[in-house]
């Protein structure tokens, strides 16, 4: 049981670390479009939107689509 719990805790930590690297930042995805990461919704999906307000929800496994982290979002 302890080994099982340890693996689950490590998976959650890894997931959190991946999310925190891109939360609130602009990224380039594999479709070559720029998206802003708005955070995680109540279903556990990372929410992104592009300049045309096209919305995209990605799971932790889909985060391999992130090609480049651009910058923090600055709302002017």
Image: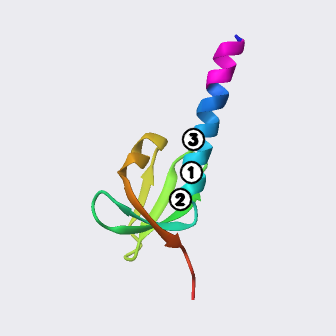
Range covered by the magenta-colored residues: 2-7
Disc 1 to disc 2, C-alpha distance: 6 Å
Residue contact between numbered discs 1 and 2, judged by CB atoms under 8 Å: yes
Direction left: furthest residue: 31
Percent coordinates x, y for residue 50 in the rendering:
40, 70
Q: In the structure shown, which secondary structural element does the residue marked by tag 3 occupy?
A: helix
Most common SS among magenta residues: helix
> Is 29 in front, or is 50?
29
Direction top: furthest residue: 1
Q: Residues within 10 Å of mark 3 (few under 14, many from 20)?
A: few
Q: Residue at x 50, y 58 (%)?
A: 47
Question: Left or right of 41: which side holds 67?
Answer: left
Q: Which residue is mark 1?
A: 19
Residue 40 visible to the viewer: no
Percent coordinates x, y for residue 65 in the rendering:
36, 51
Q: In the structure shown, which secondary structural element does the residue marked by tag 2 occupy?
A: helix
Q: Is residue 35 above or below residue 65?
A: below
Q: Is residue 42 magenta?
A: no
> Is 60 in front, or is 72?
72
Q: In the structure shown, which secondary structural element does the residue marked by tag 1 occupy?
A: helix
Q: Which residue is mark 3?
A: 15
Q: Which residue is mark 2?
A: 22
Disc 1 to disc 3, C-alpha distance: 6 Å
Q: Is residue 3 magenta?
A: yes
> Is 14 in front, or is 58?
14
Q: Quadrant of residue 29?
A: bottom left
Q: Residues within 10 Å of mark 2 (few under 14, many from 20)?
A: many
Q: Earlier in the sequence, mark 3 or mark 2?
A: 3
Disc 3 to disc 2, C-alpha distance: 12 Å
């Amino acid at each position: 049981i302890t080994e099982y719990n340890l693996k689950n805790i490590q998976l959650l930590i890894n997931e959190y670390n991946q999310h925190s690297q891109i939360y609130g930042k602009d990224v380039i995805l594999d479709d070559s479009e720029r998206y802003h990461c708005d955070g995680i919704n109540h279903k556990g999906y990372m929410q992104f939107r592009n300049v045309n307000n096209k919305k995209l929800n990605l799971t932790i496994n889909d985060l391999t689509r992130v090609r480049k982290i651009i910058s923090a979002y600055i709302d002017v």
